[in-house]
Amino acid sequence: MRPASAFRPSSVSRVLNARRVCRRCLSQQANRSVAQLLQWRPTEKADDVVINGFVRSVRSMKAHRFVALGDGSSLAPLQALVQADYAEGLTVGAAVRLTGAWVASPGAAQSHELHVNKVEVLGPSDAKTFPIQKKYQTPEYLRTMPHLRPRTPLNAVLLKLRSDSIASLTQFFAGRSFTQTHPPILTSSDCEGAGEVFTVAPASDAAGPADQDGPGSFFRSKKYLTVSTQLHLEALAQGVGNVWTLSPVFRAEESDTSRHLSEFYMLEAEMSFVDGLAPVMDLAEDMLRSLSTNLYGTATVQDLLSRSRHSGSDLAPAEDVRRRWEGLMQKDWPRMTYSDAVALLQQRADLFAHKPTWGAGLQSEHEKYLADYVGGGEKPVFITNYPRDIKAFYMLESQAASSNGQQLPGATVDCFDLLVPEFCEIAGGSMREHRLGPLLDAMKRQGIVGQQSEAGAETPSVNGLDWYVDLRRWGCPPHGGFGLGFDRLLSYLSGVQTVRDMVSFPRWFGRCDC
Ligand SMILES: NC(=O)C[C@H](N)C(=O)O
């Protein structure tokens, strides 16, 4: 315990010199963050430093209090020393403004601390009922109060990682002259054809699904929340060339897993006049390498990587997460065809619960093996040219026979899944079928073309996708693109084990709390 006099405000006026002017600039900055202040390590005491924040914890000594103050800008809190007689209202959760002297700290846990001479309680908090505590709280418990969870230091750093990532990606695409677009959220069709759409209707149509389709309904036919903006991006790419978006998408999957959400952000890019799959994969690879290289040295990422080990298993060990960043920064990610991948898996069939079979989708145990084995447990891996019959109708049939020589041209499609170690798939893309006839054939094969023609229509009804078919009628160049699960990527890069804890307000099967 230190004597109270050690943090009494100094009234000694000092001669202004250049260094002092600089210090005054920082001390008077109105919106300086805790992170910025923690980086400032002056050798002399700096008076009149003002900081806003929330009280994370209070440790009471006889004559004074140690207050840990956070504002979401860093995992580490700022330590403030407050005389006991100034400390009224300094309770856990309170929003406060503290003014004092910024001085070197004798404690080992921090280089500097604030010796407070003025306390303003701007938003009081009843510490007895405030549910967020400094001690470890399980992710399951914190998920029950998503409105308060952003106040936890980890959630705040994750929000910063998200923001920094968006800034970096925006810069990447602008540097390549991609146009950022806003495709619609309400759509007329299920893009992937997988039937995992939410329908949209006014609350006044609550009478039932029958009311949501037909001339009496709000939109005069059934509408959905988008599952992927790809189809609209294809239309936009015909207007302005290469395009991208970061949009919310919605999937009514009844999967209760750590990797699935009902609402998530998908980064999607579409390239126009592109002759093959390789440039599309190059774009995805360059984008992720640029993102990881740009962000690795930032305070946010270093904060995440230097965190102390949590007592729970809700965060991957920092050294594993560091390896993920390093893997993304490496060049020349392996690319392997699905046929070669299945052949490789079949050699190790003894390892798997599901037998690897050509023509079936890869199970996550297969993807995990491929990511670990082909990518050496570090580099992401592209698996390409999956069988046509397990992929979406819009993918371009491969012109060559399958790489194992056993399948004819057209048995596979020009597509890829991007697998990362531990997490498996984070992105998928393809060349799109840009020719009218083959596209209609694929839609028929997959049962997307409706039974009866709409009155006066020249072609059979294609379940709300007539406009998509139309894009092939007038100047449709070869094109392709990909979609990347943004929240899943951020989970991978932060070490958060479930995507539900990556998103502040997660929605998944059975849960949409506030
Ligand atoms: N833009 C894309 O290629 C993403 C694709 N439509 C998907 O949902 O996986």
Image (tube, rainbow, N blue to C red):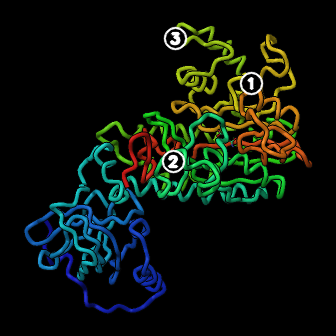
Sequence-first disc among 2 and 3: 2
Q: Residue 45, which numbered label?
A: none
Q: Position of residue 217 (x, y in %)?
A: 59, 54
Q: Quadrant of residue 131?
A: bottom left
Q: How many numbered marks have been drawn onto this rendered protein structure?
A: 3
Closer to the camera: disc 2 or disc 3? 2
Q: Nearer the viewer, residue 224 or 496?
A: 224
* Above or below, comparing residue 157 to residue 324 in the picture: below
Question: Within 10 angstroms of label 2, few (less than 14), some, or many (20 or more) residues?
Answer: some
Amino acid under label 2? Glu
The residue carrying pointer 3 sits among few (fewer than 14), some (14 to 19) or many (20 or more) residues within 10 Å by Cα, namely few
Determine which quarter of the picture holds residue 146. bottom left
Label 3 sits on what residue type?
A: Leu
**Above or below, 73 relative to 461:** below
Mark 2: secondary structure: strand
Question: From the Cβ of disc 1, is ligand 1 less than 8 Å away?
Answer: no
Query: Alpha-carbon distance for marks 1 and 3?
Result: 27 Å
Q: Nearer the viewer, residue 380 or 45?
A: 380
Residue 466 visible in image: yes
Farthest residue to the right: give it. Answer: 475
Q: Indicate the amino acid at tag 1.
A: Arg
Which residue: 44% across, 81% down?
29
Question: Which numbered marker is on residue 263?
Answer: 2
Looking at the picture, how far across and down is residue 452, in whole percent? 76, 35
Residue 388: image tag: 1
Q: What SS does tag 1 mark? A: helix
Provide residue 269's location: percent of width, then percent of height. Answer: 72, 48
What residue sits right under mark 3 in the picture?
A: 351
- The foreground one among 246 and 324 is 246
Sequence-wise first label, 1 or 3: 3
